[in-house]
Image (cartoon, rainbow, N blue to C red):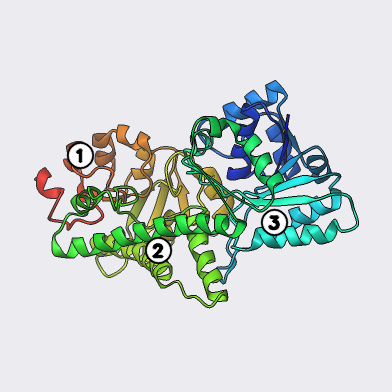
Amino acid sequence: MVNVGVMGTGYVGLVHGAVLSSYGFRVTCMDVDKQKIERLNQGISPIYEPGLEELLQSGLRAGNLVFTASAQQVVQTSDVLFIAVGTPAKEDGSADLSYVWDVVQQIGKHINGHKVIVSKSTMPVGTSRSIAMYLDGMLRGTPYRAHVASNPEFLRQGKAVSDSLSPSRVVIGAESDEAVQMLKKVYATHLEQDVPFLFTNRETAEMIKYASNSFLAVKISFINELALLSEKVGAKIQDIATGMGMDDRISPHFLQAGPGYGGSCFPKDTQAIVDVGRKNGEELYVVRAAIAANEKQKAKMVSKIEETLSFDGTLKGRTVAVWGLTFKPDTDDIRYSPSYEIIQGLLGRGAAVKVYCPQGMKQAKLYWTDLNGRIQYCGSEAECSQQADAIVLMTEWEQFRAANWEKIARGMRGNAFFDMRNMFAGDASVLQWFKYYPVGASEYGYPLREAQ
């Protein structure tokens, strides 16, 4: 049986380790945060991801899943090591690889046999080759070899467990047969399921990850720019997206207009690939435009709220209820969430802001320290909306559909409803109580006309 090590217990590493343990592998997950490790060994997940905590507890009960703060333990007890630490963006947009190199140094320090080292984190093109060269240098004069491969993840937060159990594809960038054969053993279940596999070189595997996320970001920015234009010319963005999506060359996926993309991947990955292009003498104009359009979209949403609610060019005296802090539903991840910048913009224009999110408030209180003393956290949608002049729906949590609209509307001071996800477009139960402002339709057009 292959012994698997996972270095890093964030969204990627934790899900990957838990899923592999469910296949019967003995998996050791390592993190430098000792308190986090203690909670994990008790079966307590530090993140919200549907199905994850059940997998953790099942792996612990079966003895297949171990958590440790010891780099030596995970390196020396594993045949294959997955690097799954963060690669956040620096101020200049380039990827911060300091956590990656910390892990690589620990691997080189403690290695005690032939190992397959797999880059699971999203890393700039060429990083896996650099890791291989570094480890080759460290192991010179020893009988050991490190076979380095790139195996990018394609997980959707909120669906990460199901995506790991049934992936859309598995991409493996490797240049040694030892690495390929090891990863075929690790992913034997997926091979049996006829999941599509692509075997290529390391640089191509790394590039596929960036290319995929950048393309989706471009698609989102494109539909958002059309949404802004639609509001001015009287067109309906939802019908436009439907019409475009009927073309199988385009597909309907990622054509939902909104307040801009966010999360842990699209913002940093688009910046990182632009940085890679710049360093290699190739300006990526299309990706750069998507980044700029995304920033414009968030600013436009704030301006739309201000223009609707203000009396004297500001929002002083206005109270805005923000529903949803996470960048998408079914996760507690608030990284690069559009909600942050929308809230900042509203506060900067003088509004009082109340917020509610089913899963994001704990993370917001922990990481949005600059906002904590300026916003009011609430325990429900109804509490958040009490005496508010407007609701701004930022995240399409399914539980919002069950809201008591009459109770919420009667408890408000105003009746504006800014639906940044078009979650309730055409929903008569909402439209009868509120002045409804969707994204990509003029105030007096669809869907308001249907409610009049």
Disc 2 target residue: 345
Residues 124 and 375: in front is: 124
Residue 67 lies in quadrant: top right
> Tags 2 and 3 in contact by the CB under 8 Å rule?
no
Q: CA distance from mark 2 to mark 3?
A: 35 Å
Secondary element at image label 3: helix
Q: Where's residue 112, x and y in %?
A: 86, 45
Residue depicted at x 41% and y 46%: 324
Q: Is residue 409 above or below residue 104?
A: above
Disc 3 target residue: 100
Name, please, the residue furthest toward the front.
177
Whether residue 372 sits left or right of residue 443 in the image: it is: right
- Of the residues shown, which amino acid type is indicated by label 2? Gly
Crowdedness near tag 1: few (<14), some (14–19) or many (≥20) residues, C-alpha within 10 Å: some
> Would you say residue 369 is visible in this rendering?
no
Crowdedness near tag 2: few (<14), some (14–19) or many (≥20) residues, C-alpha within 10 Å: some
> Would you say residue 60 is visible in this rendering?
yes
Disc 1 target residue: 427
Q: Is residue 380 above or below residue 368?
A: above
Residue 95 lies in quadrant: bottom right
Crowdedness near tag 3: few (<14), some (14–19) or many (≥20) residues, C-alpha within 10 Å: many
Q: Where's residue 239, x and y in %?
A: 18, 50
Q: Is residue 387 above or below residue 380?
A: below
The tag earlier along the polypeptide, 2 or 3, is 3
